[in-house]
Amino acid sequence: MNAHYSGRIASFDDFVGRGEVEARGGLHFPFHCTAIADGSRTIAPDTAVHFRLAPGPLGALEAVAIEPAEPPGAD
């Protein structure tokens, strides 16, 4: 699945390293901190993002290649 989607970070737990992306249209997809493209392993809730979807370990779709929609400091 190579399509890119837009949405926002609905939640993220730094301690557990898991979060959820809310795509446009209201669908929610889980993600692991390793799916954050810049390698930072953390991302703030309500951050606008672009992402792709891929099957997770149990076969359900998860968000991957998560990138902020606008780089930090861009105005």
Image (cartoon, rainbow, N blue to C red):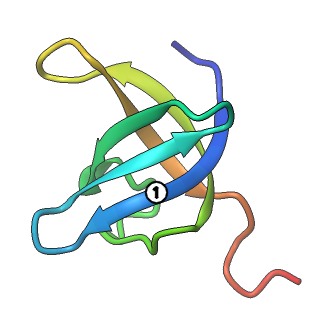
Closest to the observer, 14 or 4: 14
Q: Amino acid at mark 1?
A: Ala
Task: Say whether residue 8 is left or right of residue 63.
Answer: right
| Quadrant where the C terminus is found in the figure | bottom right
In x, y percent, where is residue 73? 74, 87
In the picture as drawn, the residue positioned furthest to the front comes out as 26
Q: Residue at x 51, y 12 (%)?
A: 1
Q: Is residue 75 above or below residue 21?
A: below
Closest to the observer, 24 or 34: 24
Task: Say whether residue 39 is left or right of residue 27.
Answer: left
Looking at the rendered structure, the secondary structure element under dot 1 is strand
Q: Is residue 1 above or below residue 63?
A: above
In x, y percent, where is residue 34? 26, 52
Q: Residue at x 32, y 64 (%)?
A: 12
Tag 1: Cα neighbours inside 10 Å, few (<14), some, or many (≥20)? Answer: some
Task: Say whether residue 63 is left or right of residue 8.
Answer: left
Q: Residue at x 39, y 35 (%)?
A: 29
Q: Is residue 66 above or below residue 75?
A: above
Residue behind mark 1? 10
Q: How many marks?
A: 1
Q: Residue at x 74, y 66 (%)?
A: 70
In the picture as drawn, the residue positioned furthest to the bottom comes out as 73
In x, y percent, where is residue 51? 55, 40
In the picture as drawn, the residue positioned furthest to the right comes out as 75
In x, y percent, where is residue 25? 67, 30
Closest to the observer, 27 or 39: 27
